[in-house]
């Protein structure tokens, strides 16, 4: 059963935007964290900063195409409709011309490896168009979704498609790697990588090799990504936490260490990020970083 929560609905003279949260069916919840539906009709272009998370993000898009490029890149933006954002990616600038309808699906990385038939390492550090992985199945899914107006029915269709793809996948994830990821995540990335390997009964080198093959990054890099994701969640959830408190909670050596890491993942300082916002839109404005 799909659970849909219409968490944000805003109308104004200049813009309309909507955010709807959906919960995947029970047999998908160990693979997928959430569905987020977005619809915007803004009457103007908008550019947002998107920071990497400890998830592989699948975006099923309609309406205007997104122009995406890594923060700091001098190259031209690439254009996407539906795409996958890898786990080990850079902060991104994402811009559209005002009309955008999409559904965002947050996948645990070992689940993404299975869903995309072991192709996780192909897009670990970059954004890739979904049709490059799923071919005509991607176009068929988007066409079907575009004909459905109900969020709950869209989420139900996605449920059915993903269940079938997981069932028919030939790419299996080693239980040791799944366990190791879950351990890292449960501890906010603050675990000894050597101890994880020892607990499994593997050498450090073999553990790192298998982890990278199935997750798309090394265990050390994964721990760093998870730690940042936790810090980002605390920073954006409330103003109650001082930066020094977030650094302590998330296992950084001090506030300076936290600030350096946050800048590495976002392109700006945590203070700048925390203060940045649009006047009447969700998200973080892209102009806080040098694109």
Image (tube, rainbow, N blue to C red):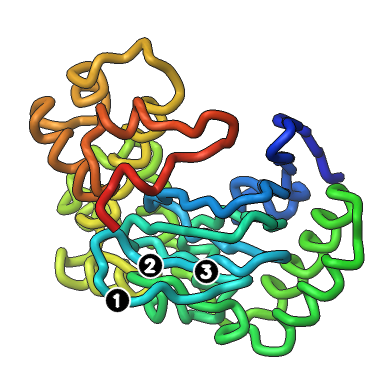
Which of pointers 1 and 2 lies earlier in the amino acid sequence?
2
Q: Is residue 45 left or right of residue 128?
A: right
Q: Toward which corner of the image does residue 163 lie, by quadrant? A: bottom right
Residue at the image point whose x is 47% and y is 58% from the top? 94
Relative image position of residue 92 (x, y in whole percent): 38, 58
What is the quadrant of the N terminus in the image? top right
Q: Toward which corner of the image does residue 61 lie, by quadrant? A: bottom right
Residue corresponding to mark 3: 84
Q: Nearer the viewer, mark 1 or mark 3?
A: 1
Which of pointers 1 and 3 lies earlier in the amino acid sequence?
1
Residue corresponding to mark 1: 75
In the image, is residue 46 above or below residue 140?
above
Residue corresponding to mark 2: 69
Q: Residues within 10 Å of mark 1 (few under 14, many from 20)?
A: few
Q: Residue furthest top?
A: 240
Relative image position of residue 207 (x, y in whole percent): 24, 66
* Disc 1 from disc 3: Cα separation: 20 Å
Q: Nearer the viewer, mark 2 or mark 3?
A: 2
């Amino acid at each position: 059963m799909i659970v849909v929560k219409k968490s944000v609905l805003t109308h104004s003279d200049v813009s309309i935007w909507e955010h709807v949260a959906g919960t995947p069916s029970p047999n998908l919840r160990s693979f997928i964290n959430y569905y987020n539906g977005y619809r915007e009709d803004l009457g103007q272009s908008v550019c947002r900063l998107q920071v990497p998370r400890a998830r592989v993000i699948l975006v099923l898009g309609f309406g205007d195409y997104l122009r995406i490029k890594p923060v700091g890149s001098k190259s031209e933006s690439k254009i996407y409709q539906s795409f996958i954002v890898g786990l080990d990616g850079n902060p991104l600038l994402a811009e559209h011309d005002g009309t955008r309808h999409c559904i965002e699906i947050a996948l645990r990385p070992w689940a993404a490896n299975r869903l995309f038939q072991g192709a996780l390492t192909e897009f670990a550090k970059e954004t890739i168009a979904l049709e490059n992985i799923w071919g005509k199945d991607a176009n068929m899914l988007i066409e079907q979704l575009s004909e459905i107006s109900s969020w709950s029915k869209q989420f139900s269709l996605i449920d059915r498609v993903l269940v079938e793809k997981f069932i028919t996948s030939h790419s299996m994830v080693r239980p040791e790697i799944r366990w190791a990821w879950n351990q890292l995540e449960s501890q906010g990335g603050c675990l000894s990588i050597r101890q994880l390997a020892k607990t499994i009964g593997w050498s450090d080198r073999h553990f790192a090799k298998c982890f990278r093959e199935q997750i798309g990054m090394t265990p050390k890099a994964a721990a760093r990504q998870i730690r940042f994701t936790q810090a980002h969640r605390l920073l954006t959830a409330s103003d109650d936490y001082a930066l020094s408190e977030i650094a302590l909670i998330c296992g950084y050596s001090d506030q300076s260490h936290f600030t350096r890491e946050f800048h590495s993942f976002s392109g700006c300082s945590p203070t700048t990020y925390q203060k940045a916002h649009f006047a009447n839109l969700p998200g973080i404005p892209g102009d806080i970083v040098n694109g």
